[in-house]
Every structure is written in structure tokens, then in C-alpha cells.
Image: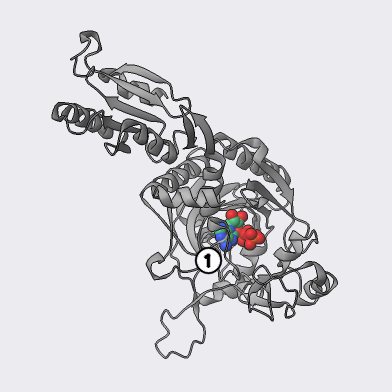
């Protein structure tokens, strides 16, 4: 994990939030290369969840929501994690996660009483990650919702408007608008990538657990009790998608939840083998029954039933959900692509990202930056490729070996070098050809400038 974090900082992928002020725990910024990878991931996810599907509708809902939304969803009363504090050094721990580390099945949905019973039975095994002592307070439920003072002009804090604890509530709120404006037939999906905020007790492990996060959600609305087949299909689709973007299958697995929330009919995670953490949740796939819409119907007083156009019957659809944090996805993708391997006379670090995800399609370099004729020719190639692909890097910093190493660390699939042969100064038959160096093998090919666009598009 340390190596991944260091590469992310060194190469402009991810920075600690508010770093010059000492940082703000659980908040990260994506740098120039990170935002390209993140946007490519979002585009790939959106394509698979909207464009490649039938009757899947994308939305982008407002972040702030009516305070009652979080009562209806159960977040104001039940969105909590069990927190205990070390009496020696005041470090806070999440008791369910610490129990999990010593092989005791526990989760945040358990009652305070049940989790404390398990905690008491296993106190000798749980040590403070900071001071190593075992002297903790009992666990208490700590609500993770983050409050705002939006519209609170009296300052009394009653009826706070919360930041979203999960992005999917925006989908449930717009479900009726989608019915009225798009007239979809069941089954149909509503899809969103939206921000969420959680007062995580111990944000840690880089992008794995942050306080500000972005969730990519698909909510599939199906006929009541017609969920099983669609649920299985959803699970397989999501697993196949991770493999299609280049994640190694051996680093992915399914895990069924040990404890279900009372309304859920089934719940599985896709786990990824994260560096330092091992297998842990990457994405949740949940069969939520009719809970969400029934709750919002109750709290809003608005009829959210779907009218079956064939039978005229009215019912509340069931919801199958897939939800993944973009930060966790980003971490899994970078970790999976990270290699240290021998090349030439040393060890190189390389990100073998899927070419469609890499921040740049290619980098263009003049062999020497103090030769105006080489620079002019390289600029011409750079403009040509930029016009076609957009994300092309210009790299003339340091010698060519250093540029290759740098582009390897960014994951750029091809480096294009304009040299004296391109100018036709050495062998006339090589005039207007360039060297293209392959990121994964280091192999170099000579390609005519006129063929470059087709060559890169094929790759
Ligand atoms: P965990 O048990 O790890 O706290 P969760 O079960 O609360 O996660 P969900 O509420 O189901 O997670 O959220 C769906 C997805 O959002 C998760 O699978 C994960 O990818 C992502 N996610 C949740 N919490 C965080 C967080 N604090 N930081 C980054 N990603 C998160």
C-alpha cells in the first residue's frame, strides 16, 4: 500500500486533502493524472450501466435533500458504526472491524448490546492500533451522517439538512419523476454517480475508507418476487465488468453477507484483494425488496406504486442495487496494475493499466529538446494526435530513458519519439517515421506518421 500511495503522490494521481495545513483526515484530491484515470473509469462504468443496457436512465440529483429523506431511509436513527475509545491514548476504533480482524463475525448492523457482548468476550484479543493497550470504553453507536447548516438562519440546529450519507437516495427520490417523464416498463434501472459523506470513525487505508466519497449506483426496479434471476445476472455482470477493465480474476471474489438488514432478501459483496488489507469489500450488490420505496411512500404521503400497463395492477417494485465507491475502484485498479520488474539494467515501476483507462493514450517526445527541427516535427505529431485522441502527453523532460520510466509509472501505453531519422537525415527511407515504444514489453517499432492514428486506435 505504501508503494501505491507514494506513486500516486509522486506522479500526480492523488494528494492528501488540505496537505499544506497538515491534511484533513479522510479527504483526498485527485491530481492531473488521477482525474484522467478517474474520469476514464467513470466513463467505462457509465457505458456499461447505461449505454450497454436497455431502459437504464442516468440522473444527477442535488446533493442536499429534504431532512425527512434521512428519517425515511433509516439513516437518522440507524446509520451508525460501533465506536470504542482507548482509555490510554483516546484512539477511536470501529469495534465491528476490529472483531473481524480477529476472526469474529460482527457488523455495524448489530445492536449495541449484541456487539458489546462480542466485544467483552474478545477483549483480550483486541489491541489499540496506536498504543498497543487493551483498555477500551464499551462500544456505542456513533451516527455517521454529516450535518450542514443549510437554511438554518436561527442557528438552533433543529431539523438539520444533512449531506448525503449514501448517493442512492437521490435515485429513490427521482423514481416517480422517471416514471412520469420517461414512461419506463419494468424492469428498468436508474443510474447515478454521486457524492456521499460519512463521519467515518477511523478513515484509513488511503482511498479505501474516506469521509468524502463518490458512489456509482445502479438501482434496478423489478416486479415484486421476480428478483432472483435478475439478481444473479447482476452479480455476474458486475464481476465480468471488473475483469473486462483488466482486473485480475484471482484478485476478485464474491462474499455473501453473514448478517442481513431486516428488509434485505440477499446481499453479496464483490471483494478485491487490496494491498495490505487482503480481500475486502469493493462493491455491494443488494436485494433491497420494496423497502426504500415503501418507506418514502410512508414518509412523503405520495403514491409511489407502479401501474402495470398489461394488467392494470398497482404495486411497489422491488429494488436490486449495485453500489461501488469510485475511490475504492480507483485504488483496486491502480493496485492491480502496479508492477515492479526488471527492464534493461534496473528495476522499473510500471502501471499496466488497460489502455482505455490510462490517463494518456500516448506520450510524444522530441529526442533532444534543444534541436528546433526535432521539436517542430514532434509538435506537429503531438497536435495531430491530440486532435484525434485528446489525452496525449508532451514529454521532453530529462533523457529518453527517464521519460520512458516516468510514462511507465503513469501507465502511458505508448511513447512516440521523433528523432533524426524522422527528419530523414540518416536514412531517407525512414523519413517521416517515428519510434513507438510499447509500455508493457519495452519493444520499439518504427511507424509512419501517416499511420500513427490508425496504429494507436487499433492498439
Ligand atoms: P463498509 O462496510 O466498508 O463501511 P458499507 O457496507 O457501509 O462499507 P455501502 O454503504 O454498501 O458500504 O456502500 C457501497 C459502496 O460504497 C461500498 O462497497 C464501497 O465501495 C463504498 N464505500 C462505502 N463507504 C466508503 C468509504 N468510507 N470510503 C470509500 N468508499 C466507501
The quarter of the rendered structure image containing the C terminus is: top left
In this rendered view, identify the residue nearer to me: 332 or 416.
416
CA neighbours of label 1 inside 10 A, class few (<14), some (14 to 19), many (20+): many
Q: Residue at x 69, y 81 (%)?
A: 87
Spot occupied by residue 45 in the image (x, y as percentages of width and height):
50, 44
Spot occupied by residue 264 in the image (x, y as percentages of width and height):
72, 59
Query: Which SS class for mark 1?
Result: loop
- Apparent side of residue 168 relative to residue 366 in the rendered image (left or right): right
Q: Quadrant of residue 286?
A: bottom right
Asked if 293 appears above or below 43 in the picture, the reply is below
Asked if 29 appears above or below 119 in the picture, the reply is above
- The residue to which callout 1 is attached is 211
The image quadrant in which ligand 1 is located? bottom right
Q: Quadrant of residue 433?
A: top left
Q: Is mark 1 within 8 Å of ligand 1?
A: yes
Asked if 352 appears above or below 81 in the picture, the reply is above
Spot occupied by residue 448 in the image (x, y as percentages of width and height):
28, 16
Q: Quadrant of residue 388?
A: top left
- Apparent side of residue 18 relative to residue 342 in the rendered image (left or right): left
- Apparent side of residue 118 relative to residue 207 in the rendered image (left or right): right
Q: Residue furthest front?
A: 345
Q: Residue furthest left?
A: 372
Q: Residue at x 68, y 80 (%)?
A: 88
Does residue 299 appear in this view?
Answer: no
In this rendered view, identify the residue nearer to me: 163 or 104.
104
In this rendered view, identify the residue nearer to me: 314 or 131.
131
In this rendered view, identify the residue nearer to me: 36 or 400.
400
Spot occupied by residue 312 in the image (x, y as percentages of width and height):
63, 53
Amino acid at each position: 500500500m505504501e508503494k501505491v500511495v507514494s506513486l500516486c503522490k509522486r506522479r500526480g494521481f492523488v494528494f492528501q486533502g488540505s496537505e499544506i495545513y497538515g491534511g484533513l483526515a479522510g479527504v483526498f484530491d485527485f491530481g492531473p493524472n488521477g482525474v484522467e484515470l478517474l474520469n476514464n473509469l467513470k466513463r467505462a462504468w457509465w457505458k456499461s450501466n447505461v449505454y450497454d443496457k436497455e431502459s437504464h436512465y442516468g440522473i444527477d440529483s442535488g446533493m442536499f435533500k429534504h431532512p425527512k429523506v434521512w428519517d425515511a431511509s433509516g439513516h437518522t436513527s440507524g446509520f451508525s458504526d460501533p465506536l470504542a475509545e482507548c482509555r490510554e491514548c483516546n484512539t477511536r476504533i470501529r469495534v465491528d472491524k476490529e472483531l473481524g480482524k480477529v476472526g469474529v463475525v460482527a457488523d455495524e448492523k448489530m445492536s449495541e448490546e449484541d456487539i458489546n457482548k462480542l466485544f467483552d468476550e474478545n477483549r483480550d484479543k483486541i489491541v489499540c492500533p496506536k498504543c498497543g493497550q487493551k483498555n477500551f470504553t464499551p462500544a456505542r453507536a456513533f451516527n455517521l451522517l454529516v450535518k450542514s447548516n443549510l437554511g438554518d438562519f436561527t442557528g438552533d440546529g433543529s431539523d438539520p439538512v444533512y449531506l448525503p450519507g449514501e448517493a442512492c437516495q437521490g435515485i429513490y427520490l427521482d423514481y416517480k419523476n422517471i416514471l412520469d417523464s420517461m414512461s419506463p416498463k419494468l424492469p428498468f434501472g436508474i443510474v447515478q454517480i454521486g457524492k456521499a459523506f460519512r463521519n467515518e470513525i477511523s478513515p484509513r487505508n488511503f482511498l479505501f475508507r474516506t469521509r468524502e466519497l463518490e458512489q456509482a449506483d445502479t438501482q434496478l426496479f423489478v416486479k415484486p418476487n421476480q428478483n432472483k434471476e435478475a439478481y444473479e445476472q447482476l452479480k455476474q455482470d458486475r464481476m465480468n465488468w471488473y475483469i473486462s477493465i483488466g482486473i485480475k480474476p484471482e484478485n476478485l471474489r464474491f462474499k455473501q453477507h453473514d448478517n442481513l438488514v431486516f428488509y434485505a432478501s440477499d446481499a453479496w459483496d464483490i471483494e478485491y484483494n487490496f494491498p495490505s488489507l487482503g480481500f475486502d469489500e469493493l462493491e455491494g450488490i443488494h436485494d433491497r425488496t420494496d423497502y426504500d420505496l415503501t418507506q418514502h411512500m410512508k414518509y412523503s404521503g405520495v403514491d409511489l406504486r407502479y401501474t402495470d400497463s398489461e394488467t392494470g395492477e398497482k404495486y411497489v417494485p422491488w429494488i436490486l442495487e449495485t453500489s461501488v465507491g469510485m475511490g475504492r475502484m480507483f485504488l483496486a485498479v491502480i493496485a492491480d496494475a502496479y508492477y515492479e520488474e526488471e527492464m534493461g539494467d534496473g528495476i522499473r515501476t510500471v502501471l499496466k493499466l488497460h489502455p482505455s483507462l490510462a490517463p494518456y493514450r500516448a506520450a510524444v517526445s522530441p529526442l533532444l529538446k534543444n534541436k528546433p527541427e526535432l521539436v517542430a516535427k514532434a509538435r506537429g505529431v503531438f497536435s495531430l494526435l491530440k486532435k484525434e485522441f485528446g489525452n496525449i502527453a508532451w514529454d521532453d523532460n530529462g533523457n529518453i530513458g527517464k521519460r520512458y520510466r516516468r510514462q511507465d509509472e503513469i501507465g502511458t501505453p505508448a511513447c512516440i519519439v521523433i528523432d533524426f531519422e524522422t527528419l530523414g537525415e540518416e536514412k531517407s527511407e525512414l523519413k517521416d517515421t517515428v519510434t513507438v515504444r510499447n509500455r508493457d514489453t519495452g519493444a520499439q517499432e518504427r511507424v509512419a506518421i501517416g499511420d500513427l492514428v490508425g496504429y494507436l486506435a487499433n492498439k
